[in-house]
Image: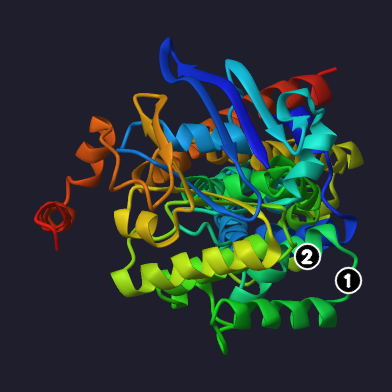
């Protein structure tokens, strides 16, 4: 399938429009729900860290530090990608699957258009912009932690900011964005595969969406482990 | 013209097409008829290049489909129009966008011109004021007409129709049949229609190929089909009560 995606490309002007539409549908359209989840997850991380800090020898600034580390390293890239596997992955599988069932893919093929390039390539390119979404999620998540801890009187503003800046390793942000790029490609290709090669009717479209969600999650979790092993332990 | 020579196709050891030879002439509505499971759809998909035949040849105006490389095949497909059984309209596009789609993909004409052409086509298939409607907002008969419009938008040399009037009421089915025949004559294109609707066969079947068990059991025209003694054809044709009554009436000299 991967080779077929890059063969017989669609007309450039059409492809440009398709890519912009997919960026809107897949990336921009996901900002709302993921930002909402992220805001509250950041707040919960800060709250739980604060509630477990009963040793007076541990500085309160740890709340800011723990919020930053959990959001940047795992929550934003991995947890949000699993959510995206449900939101975007199911959408991709069901939309392509429905096109398969209703012969729309056959129609493209009969017209001399490469359906793989027309349908999947724009999604891959759109999800290369996925790190921009994750950057917003990182900011919103940390902001959620700030709101919960500072306005909840768990830590002072100064301590929270000291914690945020404490032992900051820029490579961790790069690591998070590298992971995000890989997850973006997985989010575009696995659901597309399940939609494109499905057989049957409406019931099978639903089954294909579920299967694609499961396999995308598995791929993300395994890739997360492998990338962490490669990028952080060497 | 499309010529088929000794076409074989099977799946998992079961042969569906067992050596078909046929000719589909230019400027005529050529029909492939037969009962469900006789191999009509597999035959059509082989002709369209969606299936790879096990053996045989499919020749488009003297050029073998199987010898074409992927780019030539792609070019040939730009000369084909296809009306699918369930219309297969792109449901994310409006009626107008569906019709303009082949023009947009394969021509350099500007949007205004494409729109003008889409309007002409919509008028030709007797649909007006539906330009901005989505496929889900129009009836099955209208969807078929839009799909026919899309199929002819790029002035194809070959038009394929897979059960063009299935699921339509008799009046709408007749409208679709007549449109296909008129367009075939107007543009002098090679039209191949799959059907098991005898009304359609009677209406527009200028040449008819009858398929049974993956083989051609009979060939002729709509004028000859009621006169044949071929048992497979008579079983098929007179399976409906209406045509049984027609036959009785014929035998009684009415």
Residue at image location 34% in from the left, 48% down from the top: B196
Indicate the secondary structure of the residue bearing disc 2.
helix
In this view of the protein, which residue sits in the foreground, A118 or A125? A118
Viewer can see residue B245: yes
Q: Secondary structure at mark 1?
A: loop
Front residue of B196/B225: it is: B225
- Give me the chain letter of mark 2: B
Which residue is the site of mark 1?
B109
Residues at marks 1 and 2 touching, judged by CB atoms closer than 8 Å: yes
In the visual, does B220 lie left or right of A106?
A: left
Q: Which residue is mark 2?
A: B103
The residue sitting at 52% across, 57% down in the picture is B88
Compared with A187, B168 (above or below) is: below
Identify the residue shown where x is 73% and y is 49%: A118
> How many numbered marks appear?
2
- Whether residue A116 sits left or right of residue A80 in the image: it is right
């Amino acid at each position: 399938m991967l080779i077929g995606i890059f063969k017989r490309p669609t007309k450039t002007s059409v492809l440009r429009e398709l890519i912009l539409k997919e960026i809107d549908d897949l990336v921009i359209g996901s900002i709302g729900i993921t930002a909402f989840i992220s805001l509250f997850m950041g707040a919960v991380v800060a709250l739980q860290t604060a509630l477990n800090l009963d040793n007076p020898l541990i500085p309160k600034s740890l709340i800011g530090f723990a919020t930053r580390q959990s959001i940047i390293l795992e929550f934003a890239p991995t947890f949000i990608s699993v959510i995206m596997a449900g939101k975007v992955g199911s959408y991709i599988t069901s939309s392509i699957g429905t096109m398969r069932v209703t012969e729309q893919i056959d129609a493209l093929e009969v017209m001399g258009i490469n359906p793989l390039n027309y349908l999947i390539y724009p999604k891959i390119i759109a999800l290369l912009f996925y790190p921009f979404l994750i950057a917003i999620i990182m900011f919103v998540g940390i902001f959620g932690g700030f709101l919960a801890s500072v306005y909840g009187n768990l830590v002072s503003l100064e301590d929270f900011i000291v914690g945020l800046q404490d032992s900051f390793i820029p490579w961790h942000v790069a690591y998070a964005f590298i992971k995000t790029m890989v997850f973006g490609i997985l989010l575009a290709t696995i659901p597309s595969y399940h939609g494109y090669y499905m057989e049957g009717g409406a019931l099978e479209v639903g089954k294909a969406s579920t299967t694609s969600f499961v396999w995308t999650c598995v791929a993300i979790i395994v890739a997360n482990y492998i990338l962490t092993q490669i990028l952080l332990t060497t | 013209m499309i010529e088929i020579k000794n076409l074989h196709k099977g799946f998992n050891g079961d042969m569906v097409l067992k050596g078909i030879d046929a000719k589909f002439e230019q400027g005529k509505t050529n029909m492939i008829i037969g009962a469900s499971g006789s191999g009509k759809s597999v035959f059509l998909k082989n002709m369209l290049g969606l299936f790879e035949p096990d053996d045989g040849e499919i020749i488009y105006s003297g050029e073998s489909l199987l010898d074409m490389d992927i780019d030539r095949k792609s070019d040939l497909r730009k000369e084909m129009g296809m009306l699918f059984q369930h219309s297969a309209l792109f449901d994310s596009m409006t009626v107008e966008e569906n019709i303009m789609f082949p023009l947009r993909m394969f021509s350099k004409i500007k949007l205004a011109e494409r729109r003008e052409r889409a309007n002409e086509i919509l008028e030709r298939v007797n649909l007006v004021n539906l330009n901005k409607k989505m496929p889900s907002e129009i009836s099955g008969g209208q969807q078929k007409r839009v799909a026919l419009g899309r199929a002819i938008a790029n002035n194809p040399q070959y038009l394929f129709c897979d059960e063009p009037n299935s699921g339509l009421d008799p009046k709408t089915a007749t409208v679709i049949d007549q449109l296909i025949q008129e367009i075939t004559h107007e543009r002098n294109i090679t039209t191949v229609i799959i059907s098991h609707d005898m009304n359609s066969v009677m209406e527009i079947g200028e040449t008819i190929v009858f398929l049974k068990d993956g083989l051609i059991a009979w060939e002729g025209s709509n004028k000859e089909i009621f006169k044949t003694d071929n048992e497979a054809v008579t079983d098929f044709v007179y399976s409906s009560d209406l045509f049984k009554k027609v036959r009785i009436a014929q035998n009684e000299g009415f």
